[in-house]
Image (cartoon, coloured by chain):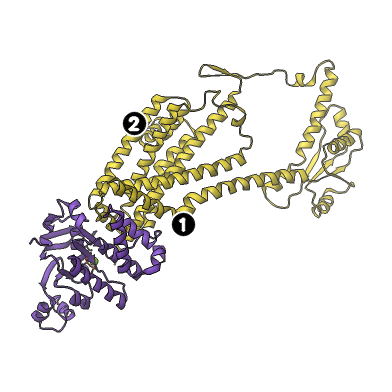
Amino acid sequence: MENAIEIINLHKRFGEVKALDGLSFTVRPGEIYGLIGPNGAGKTTALRILATLIKPSAGSARIFGLDVEKNPNDVRRIISYLPEEAGAYKNLSGLEYLEFMAAFYFANKEEAQESILEAARISGLGKRLKDKVKTYSKGMTRRLLIARALMMKPRLAILDEPTSGLDIIHAHHIRRVIQNYVEKHGVTVMLSSHNMLEVEFLCTRVALINRGRILIEGTPDEIKSRYGVDNLEEAFMEATGSA
Amino acid sequence: MPSALSNLVKKEIKEMLRDPKILLGMVLMPLIVFPIMGAAINMSTSTIEKSMRTATLAVMKLDHGPMADQLIASFKALNVSLLEIQASPINEAIRNLEKTNITTLIVIPPGFTENLTSGLKGELDVYAILRSISLSEGAKASAANAPISIYEKTLVYQAVKQAFPDRKPENVLDPIAVKSYVMFRGRLLNISPEFLQGIFMSQSFGFPMVIMLLLISAMQIAATSISIEKEEKTLETLLTLPVRRLSILAGKLAGSIVVAAAGAIAAIIGVNFYAASIFSFAPAGSVDLAELGLSLSPLAYFLLGVTMFVTIISALALAICIAVFSENVREAQSLIGPFSLIVILPSLVLMFADIDVLPFYFQIILYLMPYTHSILASKAAFIGDYITMLRSIACISLFTIVVLYIAAKIFTTEKVITARLTLRKPKIRQ
Ligand SMILES: Nc1ncnc2c1ncn2[C@@H]1O[C@H](COP(=O)(O)OP(=O)(O)OP(=O)(O)O)[C@@H](O)[C@H]1O
Ligand SMILES: [Mg+2]
């Protein structure tokens, strides 16, 4: 079976800054793959390349066999992307936002309606969906956006720090939703996170990156045993030389 | 997918028209501010008139001849409220008057009658008593002028009548009567050139003004809508959707046009109110402009519409290109500022002058500014100069195509996400 993601020797420069410096990894369908690393490591840059927002300076990235640089339009049909720290249209209600987004994926009204109901459930916003987005708290907006990213059941969901800004209960709820989507709908997930508990709980495999390269990759258990530590946080500190 | 485009346009309009800043600033403000401005100006002019009417004069008669009595009688005949005061030293009289609401003291010195009857100038001393410095107070100061000059005219008429008993004094004083005709576009019109000029003025003034308002508000709207998307990172989400990038750009343009048009209509309605209350003597009403051949032909209307359309598109695309380099709304507004100059400068200059009377180098500079051509086209519309209109439309369309091309390029590359203006901060010396 073809890989969900295949990144080979990816480079990205912003002027003097080397954001990615030879990044390579593959993700199999149905995996939840986590990118972890310190601030400025290049996580967002890698996810943006996968999401067809920016182009690599060198190397290649494929999603289900489609080259992100050569076939961005085809890629966009099978992915969804959740930017870090994003907002929604402030003067639309949460429901209007979901309707706006659903219309791009479903020509059929019933299918669209079904996905909107699904999104309403994921977001847990209930009646507040009728309110304008500008009245939402940070966490409520985040839940709306995650619901948006999952509602069309993409083949690959690219989530940049999905649960940042969420309280423990809602973060837990969202993790369950993500797992559920992977199991029930065969969605593959690529996420980045600063929450090691989350990564350990959620990810089938993890890549620890720094300065645009992979330091170590494997299942959370493999990484822990490699460094002989009890949790991913300690492994992170060891790997980045901060311990 | 055209439904994707309409989905985008609907969202743009909803999002913008619900934004209190845009709604207030672009749509409601012109509707409220212009009429208020007009009303304020109206009110202050009417207060001036009123204070002139209510100004009360005091007169101190030191001459005992009949002309002094005649002067006072003529004032009274004009319904001027007049207080005759006793002869007293001037300083003292004025000090007393300061306690009242009298604004002007007219002193008729001794010898007034004698001078007038013996062919010399009759002298009057007029003292204005001001209590503050304002327009209406200043108007009061000259309250005595009108009645005095009316009396003066009576004296002149009397003198003329005595000298030429068998002629009408008007004919002696104003011996030549001029009747005006205007030849305009092969037609003989029974109007004065000043009147025609007034119509031209209102058109040469009005159009640049409307174009300026429209373009600047359109640019602000487009810039705001892009920079909000950048600030909130909704643009990143939008660009990963299965929608053509050009549809996203077209959606932005179309949405901004609709909102800008709403703003423009509000501005035009507002300005009309304003103009109506200021220029209440506006000449156009009484004369049929179509009769004069001054109304727009259907072709001119059409070409004017085309001009406005390409002009607005280019301004919106330009604003989008600029705003892409900003990271938030405030930055976008300040980036747009300098670019408004290429709209404002030609509008202002061409409001007051025709381009061919300007110095050569200045003409070149103006011709290089794309929006000069929009205004030239609108002016040409009124004189039916279709060649100029077509030429201007070609110029502005060329500019529009270039800007649209750049906007499309920016939107189809990663620039739309990564572009930013890195203004290097001056390094702090250690
Ligand atoms: N548009 C850009 N222009 C210039 N430099 C950029 C740009 N985007 C990212 N960079 C640089 O690339 C590097 C990697 O940034 P990136 O956002 O990928 O890090 P990250 O791992 O997501 O960090 P964080 O954990 O803080 O989100 C950083 O040094 C950053 O300054
Ligand atoms: Mg990041």
Above/below status of B327 relative to B344: below
Q: How many marks?
A: 2
Mark 1 secondary-structure assignment: helix
CB under 8 Å between discs 1 and 2: no
**Both marks 1 and 2 on one chain:** yes
Q: Which amino acid does label 2 sit on?
A: Ala
Residue designated by label 1: B20
Front tag of 1 and 2: 1
Identified at 15% across, 53% down, the residue is A69
Q: Which amino acid does label 1 sit on?
A: Pro
Q: Quadrant of ligand 2?
A: bottom left
Identified at 80% across, 31% down, the residue is B152
**Would you say residue A113 is visible in this rendering?**
yes
x then y, percent, for residue A219: 11, 75
**Would you say residue B357 is visible in this rendering?**
no
Sort mark 2 into few (<14), some (14-19) or many (20+) by Cα contacts within 10 Å.
some
x then y, percent, for residue B87: 89, 46
Sort mark 1 into few (<14), some (14-19) or many (20+) by Cα contacts within 10 Å.
few
Sequence-first tag of 1 and 2: 1
x then y, percent, for residue A143: 31, 68
Residue designated by label 2: B394
